[in-house]
Image (cartoon, rainbow, N blue to C red):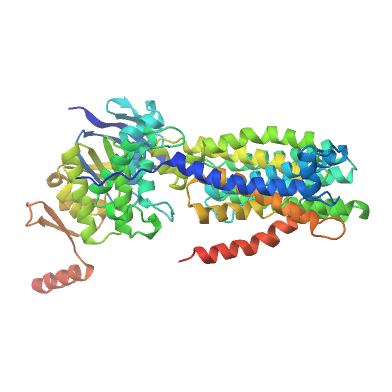
Amino acid sequence: MSPPVQPINRIAKMATVVLALLPVVLLIVVLGLCVGSTGVDFDAIYQWFSGKENSQMISDIIWRIRFPRVLLALLVGATLSLGGLVFQAILKNPLAEPYILGVSGGAAIGAIIGIIMGLSRFPGVSLLAFCGSMATLLLLLLMASGRTALRKESLLLSGVMVNAFCSAVIMFLVSITQDSRLHSILFWLMGDLSLVGLDQTLLLGAFLLPCFAVLFYLSNAMNLLLLGKESARTLGLNAEAVTVVLLVVTSFMVSSTVSFSGLLGFVGLVMPHMMRLVLGPDHRLLVPACMLGGGGYMVLCDLLARTLPQHGEMPAGVVTALIGAPLFIALLKRARP
Amino acid sequence: MKAAFEVQQVSHRYARDPVLRQLEFSVEAGEFFIIIGPNGSGKTTLLKIMAGIVPCKKGKVLVFDRPIERYSARERAAKIAYVPQASMPEFPFTVMETVLMGRTPYLGPLGIEEDTDLRIAREALAFTGMEHLADRKIDQLSGGEQQRAAIARAICQQPDIILLDEPTAALDLAHQVRIMDLMESLKKKEGITVVMVSHDLNLAAMYGERLLLLETGRLAGLGAPDEVLTYRDLEKVYGCTLLVDRSPIEQCPRITLVPHRVLEKMARESAEKKK
């Protein structure tokens, strides 16, 4: 007599995760659209939305200013969280984050050169940042591929070295820069979601959506990679090819994002861990959860960053860690038996 | 009968060091085949070549009469399961989830399993006596339980051949017998070909139908335990003094180590006799 089979319905599980997170994210998005420095509040927006008041100004504020910014935050948060998730899985290192392979260093050098040259934020600075990070990625893959089959230690160490080299260059560039440009360099380095228009955000989205799809398609492969490359291979997975695709797609995705947003830290490190604490190790759940959770978290952080200070705003990167670190420690404490 | 494996003139080297030299042997379908030999004699490399993990650069490996490289990764996974040495690292999946991963070669890219897959996984767990641990996390299991979970995953893969790399290393006596019995009954009930690398000559003598003795990558013996486990060959290959006699159980060869102090004592006594 075999015991009754307990049905594990994966699809239902995935749907539950998405349906649980989606309303929260939507709520945050609505909040992000309604709150801002111009003083347009819920009531005015409700009036506009229900068609009682037809104001060109409110419509402009929402569609031209707040919507692109909220959408950008959503994309950036999703990308960075996914980036951390993938790197933590393939490098089997809990401290891995999306910038660990040196993508950030290259992007920063490109962006700073752009800012020093006085280029506009788009396309000048973004394009240079993207070129910079792609160059470091290429360099890294060349360095690592000389060895046998992308050993994770050599990848990690190469990444750390690339980052160290880049930060030296960044320091040098900062030291020769005139004061007036320092502020924008600093904001770029800490991550800044302002100054990006709707067209550019939609362009970024067009880059990112295929990447998201590829990562979801490979989510079960990431589970198998956790068993080790050899076991994954004997289960019929082409482990080497999948690893390379994951590396390249993730780095490309992070590079494009960073070119628009600057180096927003911490989300990529901590969001995968938070989701893992709550949902377990299955990447088929973690990929959608990190996209939604990371996106929502970023919108929230950006909202706080632009509303909390009395004058002006602070970089969103400050808020991500300021809230995230204590939140994570609390979760970790609760999860330990 | 069809041969599960035909290994023809296989040589292999890491960097410049030869690990395997012109090996030639075959494994019959449904056979319990054990590879023995000292550390560094190339046992694990040979097993990995047979599993298709390490590409065979020189020579040929045929799996059921077809060259191993002609199988796609998926086809190969449906034929050959592999249980590596340290099979389950720190790993927060449950036993059931891990065993279900054995279904990968039969599932789509997202690995969405159906009721049949769950039933097969349940049966594999029952066969290895792991049912009660199905919902436990892998990293909360003992070494023996982890090894059984790895074997359950291999069974769940429904292969024709199971390759195991030292499955009894680091296990206590009860678990050693249990794992070996498990493999034997798998062979008898399901007709699965079992190829195992082992350090334990006594277990090899008791369970192996045929043994392959490796010495620095060369074939130093091939045949039934009686033919391979002779003290002459073993002392030469392992480089230490051994006593080989018959075990009271089924009269299979029994290997006993001889400590150095006993050898010294014997040498002293024979010297005194001469005086």
Quick one: B82 or B110, which is closer to the camera?
B110
The image position of residue B169, as x and y in percent, is 29, 56
Placement of A249 over or under B69, stated as above or below: below
Q: Nearer the viewer, residue B216 or A271?
A: A271
Question: In the shown orientation, is residue B172 left or right of residue A157?
Answer: left
Instruction: Report if residue A82 is visible in the image.
Output: no
Q: Quadrant of the C terminus of chain B?
A: bottom left
Q: Is residue A224 left or right of residue B80?
A: right
Which residue lies at the image location 17% right of the left edge and 39% below the top edge? B189
Q: Nearer the viewer, residue A85 or B12?
A: A85
Q: Is residue A257 above or below residue B249?
A: above
User: Residue A266 placed where, x, y %?
Assistant: 67, 55
Q: Nearer the viewer, residue A262 or B19?
A: A262
Query: Which of the 4 image quarters holds residue B12?
Result: top left
A210, above or below A223, in the image: above
Question: Which quarter of the figure is the N terminus of chain B placed in?
Answer: top left
Q: Inspect this view and state whether residue B30 appears.
A: yes
Rendered location of residue A247, percent (x, y): 59, 40
Q: Position of residue B27 (x, y in %)?
A: 23, 35
User: In the image, B154: left or right of A156?
Assistant: left
